[in-house]
Image: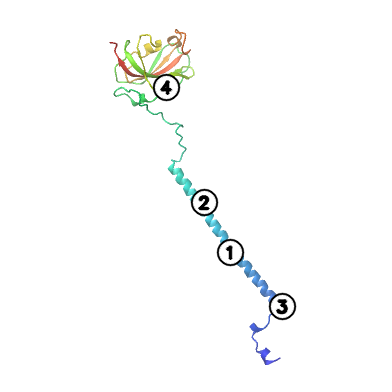
């Protein structure tokens, strides 16, 4: 063996076939590990981005919920009746008289006229012969179906008490009511439309607001 070959360093020595295969295998493993590491970084970045988007969506939903009051506020659902400006309220009257009442039906059959004061007014008492101004809603006593109301035309109704201009239940039931009162009249058929042969058959219920009363001149 020559002195030049003996003095060659191991790095300068050509690799054997076994060493070449081992080096190639190690290089392939390094490349695979690098690819896996890159894939993990991309997956973490994607998960992080998705989490950020989810947080933003949740925050937006919470903000919208708080802004809207947290509920579906339909103006037609359970909304309180509003006061009507056209109603001529007596001085010092309960503001509730400007809100349309919603009477329901009664129970059983009526034998006599029944007057129930729902709101007590502080004005003068109604007497036979007075010319009065009222608002009213009329429903059937048995089923509570509305058949007439001054509120539908946005105009009160006026008449002379005891002059036969209205049914007997009104002529008798409103005497003694005070101006500013809301009274409920449960009227048997005999004091309603039975004698006239027209109108609504059966017992009736009216809710009447007394807005004004002027003595006969």
- In this picture, residue 116 sits left or right of residue 18: left
| Disc 3 from disc 1: Cα separation | 32 Å
Q: Secondary structure at mark 4?
A: helix
Check contact, mark 2 vs mark 3: CB within 8 A: no
- Residue 176 visible in the current orientation: no
User: In the image as oriented, which residue stretches furthest toward the bottom?
Assistant: 3
| Disc 2 from disc 3: Cα separation | 56 Å
Q: Residues within 10 Å of mark 4 (few under 14, many from 20)?
A: few
Give percent across and percent down for residue 213.
Answer: 31, 16
Q: First in sequence, mark 4 or 1: give its number.
A: 1
Image quadrant holding the N terminus, namely: bottom right
Q: First in sequence, mark 1 or 2: give its number.
A: 1
Residue position marked by numbered label 4 in the rendering:
152
Residue position marked by numbered label 3 in the rendering:
17
Give residue 132's quadrant in the image.
top left
Circle on res. 38: 1
Q: Secondary structure at mark 3?
A: helix
Circle on res. 155: none
Residue position marked by numbered label 2 in the rendering:
54
Q: Residues within 10 Å of mark 2 (few under 14, many from 20)?
A: few
Give residue 155's quadrant in the image.
top left
User: Relative to residue 179, is residue 44 depicted above or below?
Assistant: below
| Disc 2 from disc 4: Cα separation | 53 Å
- Residue 170 visible in the current orientation: yes
User: Relative to residue 67, is residue 175 depicted above or below?
Assistant: above
Residue at image x 63%, y 67%?
32
| Disc 4 from disc 1: Cα separation | 77 Å
Residue at image x 42%, y 15%?
186
Give percent across and percent down for residue 56.
Answer: 49, 51
Residue at image x 46%, y 44%?
64
Give percent across and percent down for residue 210.
Answer: 34, 18
């Amino acid at each position: 063996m020559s002195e030049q070959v003996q003095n060659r360093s191991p790095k300068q020595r050509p690799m054997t076939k076994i060493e070449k295969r081992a080096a190639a295998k190690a290089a392939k493993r390094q490349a695979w590990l690098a690819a896996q590491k890159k894939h993990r970084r991309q997956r973490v970045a994607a998960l992080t981005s998705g989490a950020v988007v989810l947080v933003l969506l949740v925050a937006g939903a919470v903000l919208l919920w708080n802004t809207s009051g947290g509920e579906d506020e339909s103006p037609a659902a359970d909304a309180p009746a509003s006061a009507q400006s056209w109603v001529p309220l007596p001085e010092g009257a309960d503001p509730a008289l400007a809100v349309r009442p919603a009477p329901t039906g009664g129970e059983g059959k009526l034998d006599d006229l029944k007057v129930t004061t729902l709101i007590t007014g502080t004005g003068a008492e109604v007497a036979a012969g007075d010319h009065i101004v009222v608002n009213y809603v009329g429903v059937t006593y048995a089923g509570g179906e509305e058949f007439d109301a001054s509120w539908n035309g946005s105009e009160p109704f006026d008449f002379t008490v005891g002059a036969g201009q209205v049914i007997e239940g009104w002529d008798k039931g409103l005497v003694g009511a005070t101006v500013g009162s809301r009274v409920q009249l449960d009227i048997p058929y005999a004091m309603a439309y039975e004698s006239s042969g027209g109108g609504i058959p059966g017992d009736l219920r009216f809710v009447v607001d007394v807005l004004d009363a002027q003595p006969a001149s």
